[in-house]
Amino acid sequence: MNRFVSTFTNKIDAKGRVSIPAPFRAVLERDGYAHGSVGGVYCYPSLDAPALDAGGERLAKKIDGLLSGLPDYSDERDELSVALYGDVQVLSLDGDGRIGLPESLRAHAGLTTQVTFVGLGDKFQMWEPGRFAKRRERAREKVQHTRKLFSAGNRHASSEEGGDEGARG
Amino acid sequence: MNRFVSTFTNKIDAKGRVSIPAPFRAVLERDGYAHGSVGGVYCYPSLDAPALDAGGERLAKKIDGLLSGLPDYSDERDELSVALYGDVQVLSLDGDGRIGLPESLRAHAGLTTQVTFVGLGDKFQMWEPGRFAKRRERAREKVQHTRKLFSAGNRHASSEEGGDEGARG
DNA sequence: GCTTTTCCCATGGCATCCCATATTGGCCCA
DNA sequence: TGGGCCAATATGGGATGCCATGGGAAAAGC
């Protein structure tokens, strides 16, 4: 597997450590860790959500790609650079696949005792479980909405709602 | 055969495992498993039915297709990703063609002792047998209704209907 | 010297792997 | 055409390995 998928919830222990779900670790290994050697994960506060974004080498390349599209020394590029790179931390994995979460990152996501890992394909996010539940609910409604729009001009009365196209349903 | 067709009902054993019907396994093998290696099936809660959607690589590509239109790192994409990837589980098949159903998925579909597998072409659904029976009943009524309208000026209705069901156990 | 982090090991639960069995359906042969 | 043999499948159970989690000890930083 090459993508981060599904969600897992793990505990933060007394030392502030948390296990990266094994399937995600597997993806990171294939992807190439952030920092060549033993194991490192890029991690930064999500720009538009109370969560943390994280990933491996592919994520880093994507960020680079975004920036390379903007002219050097432009204000826009500087701002984006700061936003994207400024708060990035390289979290190293210990021998058991755990990372330690710095206080600044924990604060941004409101993490206290548990972390919900959410696979988003090229990256994954870390959420406080309660907040994530709400976010997921919103996301579902949105998908359902767009799906209705999508199938509105598309419906050939297939009798069963599950029989039509679209990813879900 | 390249599509999932007909329905089968199998048991959930004490460990929460259930056999994928052999014909569906055959389709998955041709389709390409979700996970290159031994066997993996994409599975997620249906948005608008108390059932689970599942499929192989083709289904995964469809999900990707929905996202590929959106720009990287947009809020919109993240939100959609949550709904599409976040709820997906990659269920691995054991050597005997069985999968284990996580509690969260079982809960959504109300699965307890048996699972009805329903082929829908590119994917298949997993239902609690009782709920599926009701759903199918409604679907038939609907079909008959539309057929009457349809065949009012155009009769070739073969009237053959109940020829499905490959249940066992 | 004290606190904080990193490494290593222990453990319990869960998931996976493997093997056994029975029942079904198909095939061959009489 | 009928009977019996064989292959495939679904299902059950035991064992084993992985993984998340906790804790102690060593190393590094303040």
Image (tube, coloured by chain):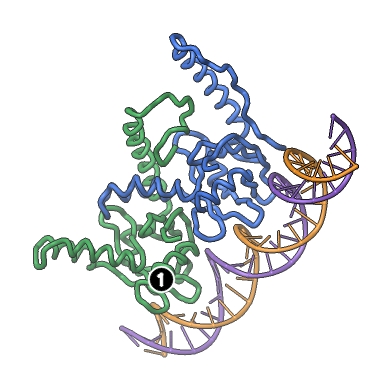
Chain colours: A green, B blue, C orange, D purple
Q: Position of residue B140 (x, y in %)?
A: 54, 21
Total marks drawn?
1
Residue at the top extreme?
B152
Front position in the image: B27 or B102: B27
The amino acid pointed to by label 1 is Gly
Tell me the quarter of the picture where residue D22 sits. bottom right
- B76 left or right of B24? left
| Residue A150 appearing in the image | yes
Q: Position of residue A41 (x, y in %)?
A: 37, 69
Query: Mark 1 packing: few (<14 Cα in 10 Å), some, or many (20+)?
Result: some
Residue beneath disc 1: A100
Q: Secondary structure at mark 1?
A: strand
For image coordinates 65% across by 37% down, the residue present is B9
Which quadrant of the rendered structure holds the C terminus of chain B? top right
For image coordinates 51% across by 44% down, the residue present is B54
Q: Position of residue D2 (x, y in %)?
A: 88, 32
Q: Chain of mark 1?
A: A
